[in-house]
Amino acid sequence: MASKRIGIFGFEGVVGIDLFGPAQVFAGVEIGDGRGNVQPGYDVLTIGLSNRPFATDAGIIVKPRNTFKNAPSLDTFIIPGGKALRCTGAFGLAETGLLSGHKVTTHWRFARDLARRFPDLQVQDNAIFLKDGSFYTSAGATAGIDLCLHLIEEDYGAEVALFVARDLVVYLKRSGGQEQYSEPLQFQTQSIDRFTELTSWMVSHLNENLSVEALASRACLCPRHFSRRFKRAFGHSPADFVEKLRIDEARRRLSNGLTGIESVGASVGFKSAHVFRRAFERRLGINPKDFRERFESNQNLSTPGKQSALLKARQNSRLVGRRG
């Protein structure tokens, strides 16, 4: 099996994590050549407007390996974010007209501006990453790493992607359908008191006792006082908030497709499959089985065959806008 070729656009002021993050992720893939030898799964090229070195936004100097004039055919071309592209990769890609009519995402801070400047785009402002045909867009930064892991999964399967995620010490491999501004992050952002440290513990212990009494004990409050303060601070009762956390994590695990539905429910703390199904359907309007089937169906709806207008790429090339 031949290595796949990845091109990453490099330019003055490029966001460093958008450039180096994908390069490091793809560099972690190794494949067998059928003769007992191991070879890189990807050949990663930095492609510049010229051969001249450029500096990232953090001041790191990078020398391009190729230019647009001499770049070879690519399987995937990545457009990072940076000031030269008016902040996010989606802006640069949208300027070409290639994204017209497509579903896209970008960093939440720039989503409204993207939608305003390019009204023909279907901007979804809270997805980690999206795939529409041969075009992929992400929220950038660490969400770009999630997208790269997804591309690895498309190319070499879930096991390889999970191995790379573990090797990079990624906390979890998130699916594109998850929100940029997750429930635990909202909790941490809003919290200014003793609830702050409770968030990460709850997320890491979803299958344990998260009753009001147990949580109140960890917060060193009586249950009644804890419930009042929690509701006043976050607008949800503790029980409602815990269920939302469990459903969000269950949704992620279902999208991975590696665990049975009943096992997913038990792993996030639901006492029975029946309770899990009822809570899942109440929250999302769909039962876990149909959700997994729909997610798997959407994963297989890619539309191959669009060529990149920026490079003479292969017919099955992918064009990726990082940070959007």
Image (spheres, helix red, strand yellow):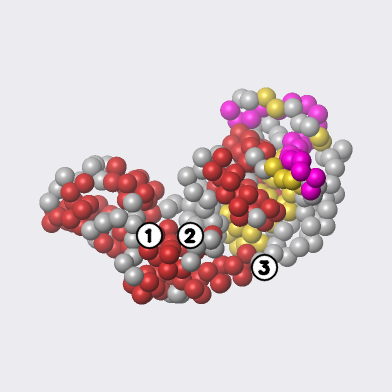
Find the residue positioned furthest to the front: 36
Question: Seen in the image, is 199 located left or right of residue 8?
Answer: left
Q: Amino acid at mark 1?
A: Val
Q: Relative to residue 161, is residue 272 depicted above or below?
A: below
The range drawn in magenta is 34-58
Q: Nearer the viewer, mark 3 or mark 2?
A: 2
Residue 76: % across, % down: 74, 49
User: Could you tell me which residue is drawn at 36 percent across and 49 percent down?
Assistant: 204
Q: Kindly identify which numbered label has been placed on residue 268.
A: 1
Dot 3: element: loop
Q: How many marks?
A: 3
Residue 203: % across, % down: 36, 51
Dot 1: element: loop
The answer to which image quadrant residue 268 occupies is bottom left
The foreground one among 205 and 215 is: 205
Q: Amino acid at mark 3?
A: Leu
User: Could you tell me which residue is drawn at 67 percent across and 24 percent down?
Assistant: 61
Q: Amino acid at mark 2?
A: Arg
Q: Relative to residue 155, is residue 103 depicted above or below?
A: below
Q: Which residue is mark 3?
A: 301
User: Could you tell me which residue is drawn at 61 percent across and 34 percent down?
Assistant: 16
Which of disc 1 and disc 2 is earlier in sequence? 2
Residue 39: % across, % down: 75, 40
Q: Which residue is mark 2?
A: 253
